[in-house]
Amino acid sequence: MSATRRQILARTGASVAGIAFTGALSELFAGTAVAAPLSGGHAGYGPLVPDPAGLLDLPDGFSYKVLSRQGDPLRSGEGPVPSNHDGMGAFPGRRGRVHLVRNHENRVTGRIGVPVVDGLTYDPAAKGGCTVLTLDGRGEVLDERVAVAGTAVNCAGGPTPWRTWLTCEETEDRAGTNGYTKDHGFIFEVDGADPRRTGAVPLTAMGRFQHEAVAVDPDSGIVYETEDAFQHPFGLFYRFLPEKPLGGTGSLRAGGALEAMRVPGVPDLSAVREPGTCFERIEWVPVPDPLATGTPIRHQDFGPRGITHAQKLEGCYWGGDPRTGGAVYFVSSFARTKDGSAATHFGQVWKYEPARRRLTLVVVFGPDTDVRLPGESPDNICLAPTGGLMVCEDGDGAQHVFGVSRKGEVYPVARGAQNIGTPDAPEWGEFAGVTFSPDGSTMYVNCYTPGTTFAVTGPWYRPPVG
């Protein structure tokens, strides 16, 4: 969030940040299964209550438990809990257990790396990877261990229909760069129930680029992938057509075809400003060199008509109305003309309907709607038990998890209270990896810095009230 907008908030006396948006928020929830619909047109669980322990502020009636903190010993004895807690997925286990697979977005220096474990390590020089927490039916931690190591900058990812986690490397560093012994920029599959079943095998056919998140079409098995490239030309939106769709754990190793999305006449998605804008007959173009052996994919030659780019492509999930074949939603957290984008925005949510080959701009975040509501840089998102969304805002200043109801009402769910700055210049680590337990009773979320994993319980199924 910009300093200017912070000053506006101070002058107006606003005490709680919200998300400003334009567009049809209801489209985000169409056709999704819900346990209890919202009623009465109200949203929110009340004001956030300052936490005496200085960790996590929540509404009255909610409580949290710290499941894991960076630097503490892993229960497996493999080493310390790694830092930079990022994307995360929760999967049901046997006898009511939950396997919580957590990314660690570690680079080569300055952080607690994922311990090197024999049989689970891709590149011993890399410090990223995943750990998995196994919880019992009461939410107590039974085990915590390495799930994959020796990967780099594991940012987000996504679950598969066969209950594994796809963890994504947000880098394209080659062997010999930053001390790495192998090429990076791949997706790895992680089985939280049995990590050795999946090992540390890069899914090379899915492309080598700065991966962010993935979503799997549960009917076709097609995997959609976002690319969060840091420099112009920015990332692409991909789909991977596997040779063995929906084949279960390990099937993605069989290979497939990687394609990039082309929106005819639109080289940069940031140029589209009006929610509801639709593009028909979306094209998918084969990627010339998925391994980027000589040139990064986004720089490759896609022919005289080019390809469609977008800055800061991040969150990605499957939803929509199954009666029309479903849809994949993906997030552009922001775009800035000063970085090379065609236009500036503070966050977009796009919807692609494969059956109709149609792309729609659903939501635009930002101060153009209401400067008192500083919604910007939406990042990790997930569906909530009430059928709305939970959104991790990745901006400056105070860090929140926001709820968004089916009616588009926005309310704060959590606020980070761990000051990583100074009393005079406070800072807070961003939230990431928001997800819910399989039964919807618990929200799990990470604080990126200092790496902390929370389990938040409360009346999640109660219709929120103002």
Image (cartoon, rainbow, N blue to C red):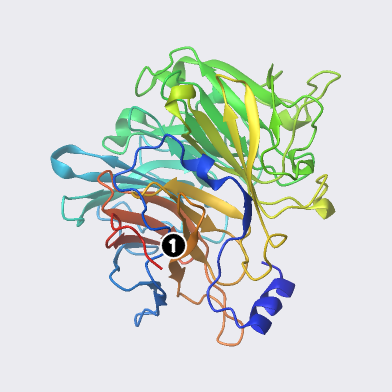
Q: Which residue is mark 1?
A: 451
In this view, the residue farthest toward the left is 95
Q: Is residue 435 left or right of residue 124?
A: left
Q: Is residue 307 left or right of residue 245?
A: right
Q: Position of residue 373 (x, y in %)?
A: 61, 67
Q: Is residue 194 left or right of residue 271?
A: left
From this view, report whether residue 159 is shown above or below residue 436: above
Residue 43 visible in the shown view: yes
Q: Position of residue 371 (x, y in %)?
A: 69, 68
In this view, the residue farthest toward the front is 40
Q: Position of residue 420 (x, y in %)?
A: 52, 75
Q: Position of residue 320 (x, y in %)?
A: 48, 33
Q: Quadrant of residue 172?
A: top right
Residue depicted at x 16% and y 55%: 138
Residue depicted at x 42% and y 56%: 82
Please state which of residues 282 and 176 is positioned toward the viewer in this rendering: 282
Q: Tag 1, which secondary structure?
A: loop
Q: How many dots with numbers?
A: 1
Point out the image quarter for the N terminus. Answer: bottom right
Point out the image quarter for the C terminus. Answer: bottom left
Residue depicted at x 57% and y 75%: 427
From this view, report whether residue 245 is shown above or below residue 210: above
